[in-house]
Amino acid sequence: MSNLRQLPSIDNLLQSSVVEKLISSYGRPLTLTAIRYTLDSIRENYSPDRNIPTKEKILQLVTSKLNDWTSPSLRPIINASGVILHTNLGRAPLSEAALQATQEVAMNYSTLEYDLSRGQRGSRLIHAESLLRKLTGAEAALIVNNNAAAVLLILTALARRRKVVIARTQLVEIGGGFRIPDVMKQSGAKLFEVGTTNRVHISDYELSLEEKPALFLRAHRSNFQIVGFTSEPSLREIGTVARQAGIPLFDDLGSGSLIDTSRYGLGHEPMVQESLKEGADLVSFSGDKLLGGPQAGIIVGKSELIKKLKNHPLSRAIRADKLCLAAMTATLLHYLKDEVESQIPIWRMIATPIDSIQIRVQNWISELGNGEIVAGESTVGGGSLPGETLPTFLLALQVQSPSRFMAKLRESQPPIIARLENDMVLLDPRTVLPELDQDLLSGLISCLKTAYIK
């Protein structure tokens, strides 16, 4: 007789109190699917020399499978890596006000495309536009779903089948292998390179006018630097040539900032307001990098050009949704109310005094009864301020197997992301939100109980 006949039937399993609880939690259809999947798996892997799992074991397997199927892959984590805008970890955390605004819009109907004063259909394109005009001095603004989409829209709407002038020093590749030349190709614009890989002169732009280009494009190198024997004309100089020729100048800032980063001991990241003052007709930048808001591509500039972008069919395909617009409005209000350092998480991190970081590490060590404090550096990350760092203090843990300990941290609830240097596990308080300190310490204490400490 085949041992497979000892397998309990589906009806038998359904009579179990365990399955009743599973049905209550996961629903009957999904629970039945998990039971069938588990029984089929046992049959497929059956061999005469292997015992058939008990009913209790089968129910454990069903429970585990349901948990695997319903556990979200996108989960919150504790970022103790010291990288403020960590692209792999979701870049900028939102402010409390942005979260509240998003929740309120998500849970209710909204004025997304409804004009209350007229009692009829309105436009979603107006949301946050007035704030962007106030903050940047631009004539008009448009929000799309990310900065790559903003670049694609501008090139498609203003330069399709026509030439776009760009310096060879700016043919950048951003995260995920996306390259400026590839984006231009998809837009239908024709790339016209000027200068060399290390030196570009204003005369290169002047000579390019013979090609009758539709657009001048400057792409800011936000995630790398060119050093040594280099030169480039300023945006103001390029703008003068473009203006005299009647050609729009588009400045792709990539990250983009509305405040002066040099105030925090960092290099000066080009500000959106500066680009507009220096002659850019259009400026695009990200919402979830140095702005500290939701993922978005923001375009500001001349109203006549923004109008063309708004009316282009592609703008509908890449438009921002109501949640993005709600979070963006709340984030921009922090800038307008001069409360960036107190309300926007990434700017709170950047502005945190070194003394308070040292105190936090000392408190961690006291709670853990383990570790030492070492000096280190935090980085901005996210394709912003390449090579720039902020001084910090780190919690350093020495364990027998650092890689295994790091894996244990990632299995914590919530997972903890640290960094490994010179066989030491390092955790940077700068990127750990203060309200997560107890979760961090609980996870560390649990992992340290099973780790062999050096």
Image: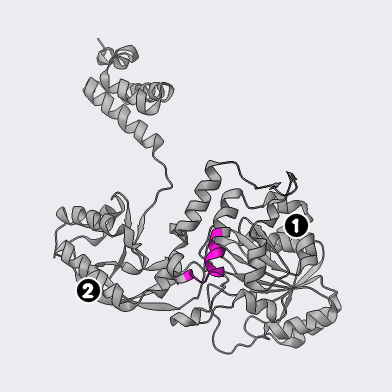
Query: Tag 2: residue type?
Result: Ile
Residue extending farthest to the bottom is 229
Q: Position of residue 433 (x, y in %)?
A: 35, 62
Q: Residue at x 28, y 71 (%)?
A: 394
**Mark 1 or 2, which is nearer the eye?**
1
Is 332 inside the magenta-drawn segment?
yes
Q: Disc 2 designates what residue?
A: 373
Q: Residue at x 67, y 62 (%)?
A: 129
Q: Please name whichever residue, 442 or 402, is drawn nearer the observer in this view of the structure.
A: 442
Regarding residue 395, the answer to whether it shows in the image is no
Query: Tag 1: residue type?
Result: Lys
447 relative position to 310: left or right: left
Q: Please name whichever residue, 108 or 156, is drawn nearer the observer in this view of the structure.
A: 108
Q: Residues within 10 Å of mark 2 (few under 14, many from 20)?
A: some
Tell me whether the residue at label 1 lies in contact with that at label 2, contact meaning CB atoms closer than 8 angstroms. no
Q: Please name whichever residue, 438 or 104, is drawn nearer the observer in this view of the structure.
A: 104
Q: Which residues are magenta?
A: 330-340
In the picture, the disc for residue 310 is 1
Q: Position of residue 264 (x, y in %)?
A: 44, 80
In the picture, the disc for residue 62 is none
Q: Quadrant of residue 420?
A: bottom left
Task: Report, in whole angstroms, how far the alpha carbon at label 1 lies from the one at label 2.
Answer: 53 Å
Q: Position of residue 340 (x, y in %)?
A: 48, 69
Q: Residue at x 73, y 44 (%)?
A: 119
Quarter of the image with the N terminus is top left
Q: Residues within 10 Å of mark 1 (few under 14, many from 20)?
A: some
Q: Quadrant of residue 370?
A: bottom left
Quarter of the image with the C terminus is bottom left
Secondary structure beneath dot 2 equals strand
Secondary structure beneath dot 1 equals helix
